[in-house]
Image (spheres, helix red, strand yellow):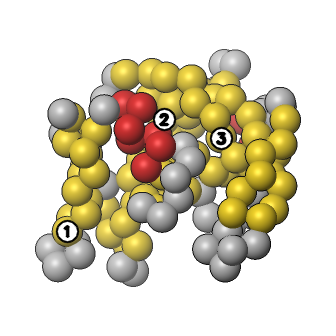
Amino acid sequence: MHEGTFIDNIPLISIILKQNKLVETIAFVLDTGFTGNLQVTPEIASYLGLNPMGISFVQMANGQTISVPIAAISATIEGITKTVPVLISNGMPLAGIGLFSQFGYTVIVDCKKKEVYLKNN
């Protein structure tokens, strides 16, 4: 089981990202409304040396569609590593349902107890 935390009512989950020889653990907002895998800021992408491989069209919560650069990165959770798409956009780093589906996790967010964790299926 992989545990996260709550800060100011925001559920966070740490994921290890690897790009070339850089390894960085980043706390991502667990966003159940985000159907993608990961989103990082341009600053994080630059630090990790991510090279966009294309553009993804993303529909925002307000219905607007925007184009966002997309790259690939190695993400590790509990010792399991997978190469996943990562959007590069302003805002907080996000981890979405698509990522946890690829890893085979059930996501548990208990707002009352302020607990967040991933349960292996």
Residue denoted by label 1: 110
Tell me: residue 41, above or below residue 115.
above
Q: Can see residue 10?
A: yes
Near mark 3 (Cα within 10 A), the count class, few <14, some 14-19 or many ≥20, is many
Q: Which residue is drawn at 39% across and 52% down?
A: 13
Closer to viewer: mark 2 or mark 3 = 3
Q: Residue at x 54, y 43 (%)?
A: 37
Tell me: residue 70, above or below residue 7.
above
Whole-angstrom CA distance, mark 2 to mark 3, is 13 Å
Residue denoted by label 3: 86
User: In the rendered structure, which amino acid carries the disc numbered 2?
Assistant: Ile
User: In the rendered structure, which amino acid carries the disc numbered 1?
Assistant: Asp
Q: At numbered mark 1, what does the secondary structure look like: helix, strand or loop?
A: strand
Q: Is residue 74 left or right of residue 3?
A: right
The residue nearer to you, when weighing 110 against 59, is 59
Q: Earlier in the sequence, mark 1 or mark 2?
A: 2
Residue denoted by label 2: 16
Cβ–Cβ under 8 Å for marks 3 and 1:
no
User: In the rendered structure, which amino acid carries the disc numbered 3?
Assistant: Val
Please tell me in which quadrant of the rendered image residue 105 appears.
top left
Whole-angstrom CA distance, mark 1 to mark 2, is 23 Å
Quadrant where the C terminus is found in the figure: top left
Horizontal and vertical percent for residue 91? 68, 67
Q: At numbered mark 2, what does the secondary structure look like: helix, strand or loop?
A: strand
Q: Which of marks 3 and 1 is nearer the N terminus?
A: 3
Q: At numbered mark 3, what does the secondary structure look like: helix, strand or loop?
A: strand
